[in-house]
Image (cartoon, rainbow, N blue to C red):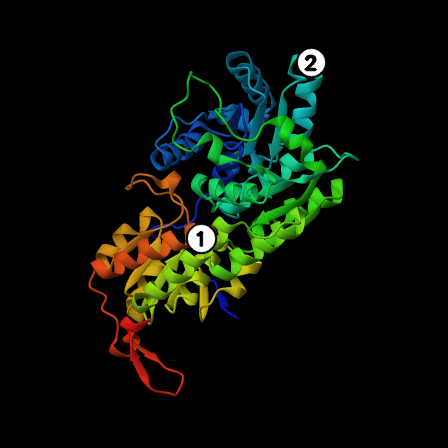
Amino acid sequence: MAEVLHPRKSLSINPLKMSQPLGGAMAFMGIEACMPLLHGSQGCTAFGLVLLVRHFREAIPFQTTAMNEVTTILGGVDNLEQACLNIYKRTNCKVVGICTTGLTETRGEDLKGDVALIRQRHPELADVELVYVTTPDFSGALEVGWGKAVTAMVEQIVQPTAIHDPQRVNILAGSHLTPGDIEEIREMVEAFGLTATVLPDLSGSLDGHVPDQHMGTTYGGTTVAEIRAMGGAACTIAIGQHMRYAAALLESKTGVTSHVLDRLTGLGAVDDFVRILQTVSGRTTPQRLRRQRSQLQDAMLDGHFYFGRTKVAVAAEPDLLFAATSWLSEMGAEVVSAVTSMDSPILSKVPAASVVVGDLDDLETAAAQHGAELLITHSHGRMAAEHLGIPLFRLGFPMFDRLGAAHRRSVGYRGTRDLIFEVGNLLIEHAHEPQPDDWALTDGEGGHASAATH
């Protein structure tokens, strides 16, 4: 078990953490015809908008209640009311995803009461889902805000039903999954003859496509009708520990059995996912998935020479950190530094001596002390990699200095295979030579055979 450390620092140097409101807004981006609305000052929204645009390289629908000094003191219900009305009149949206910020949370806004008052005053909003979630940016991190937003959607939109479709599966997608990852998961579900309802579905809204027409809201994603019908699925599969509460709420509300998977990166982890799909569908694994599994096994054999004994430093949100470090450990690498943004039950499972809840300065310091040969984190880690003189593999959000962030995949058999090749090629490019012992394979009688014979 990894020891979780909390360094006492008076400030953050090169921050790793992204805020709760940003995580909540990102989750709402995966809903069809939705407008994420940050209940706070304009600056809070502008900063998050810049990160989203730079990462996805797409037009991002984002609005703010534009709180100022006066409304901060007197209360923001009027600003929230006007924002909801303006959004509805100008965009004809189906969902307004309301996320609080540190400003409104510090004041103590009664968000639930405010939304009820707005509905009472404006019956024309009856067909619009006003989904509200408390996401103070002075606590938690991106994956907490994402998890809260998904939980709020389950609580406020999903409808219980006595009719269940045995061929439908709910997928609660974690914040660490890219649109490409979600696409891969859906294809695996469909390979068993099942239909997936993904919540939220960034693969429909932020997958880099060119829409046929201009939309003032999100374009693609999970529809309100699909969310309401999630109570009639055969089962729910949640990806990531921060999806556990949403899965438990969905199960208690509708009776739909839930499974929580810590990760979908790595041979054994994907096998666990496939076993669930086998049970739900009653089918054996399709031949194309068997072929993909075989390809992953071969990629692991090809790549382990370069991963073996490589010292790696990783910084990411808790669930992404666990997925990445577990996969690295399975490939024979040594995780010498693990840094994350917040506490989480999953951290104790990270295959490292300790996990630091800190920033990228903590990552850089530990990487230098332990002689790390590879750095893995998001694009803000590029300075640390330059200082250390080691390669950086970009993983997570934001990734603003590379193209195709939305299409990268690291889940499933194919995603794990591609990840092996990407990181392995980076190690080869930077002249990480395998040790002599790594090239030798032990035969059944204790002798050695050339690696070329495998």
Question: In this rendering, is residue 37 above or below 21?
Answer: above
Mark closer to the chain start, 1 or 2? 2
- The Cα atoms of the two marked residues, 1 and 2, are separated by 53 Å
Residue nearer the viewer, 376 or 62: 376
The crowding category of the residue bearing disc 2, from other C-alpha atoms within 10 Å (few below 14, some 14 to 19, many at least 20), is: few
Asked whether residue 9 appears in the rendered view, the answer is no
Question: In this rendering, is residue 429 above or below 335?
Answer: above
Mark 1 lies on a secondary structure that is helix
- Where in the figure is residue 395, as x and y percent of width and height? 37, 50
Task: Determine which of the numbered discs, if any, sits on residue 423 in the image.
Answer: none
The residue indicated by pointer 1 is 292
Asked whether residue 59 appears in the rendered view, the answer is yes
Name the quarter where the C terminus is drawn.
bottom left
Residue located 44% across and 53% down the image: 292
Quarter-wise, where is residue 298 in the image? Answer: bottom left
How many numbered dots are placed on residues in this image? 2
Residue located 61% across and 23% down the image: 77
Amino acid residing under circle 1: Gln
Q: Please state if 441 lies on the left or on the right of 20 as rendered.
A: left
Amino acid residing under circle 2: Pro
The residue indicated by pointer 2 is 123
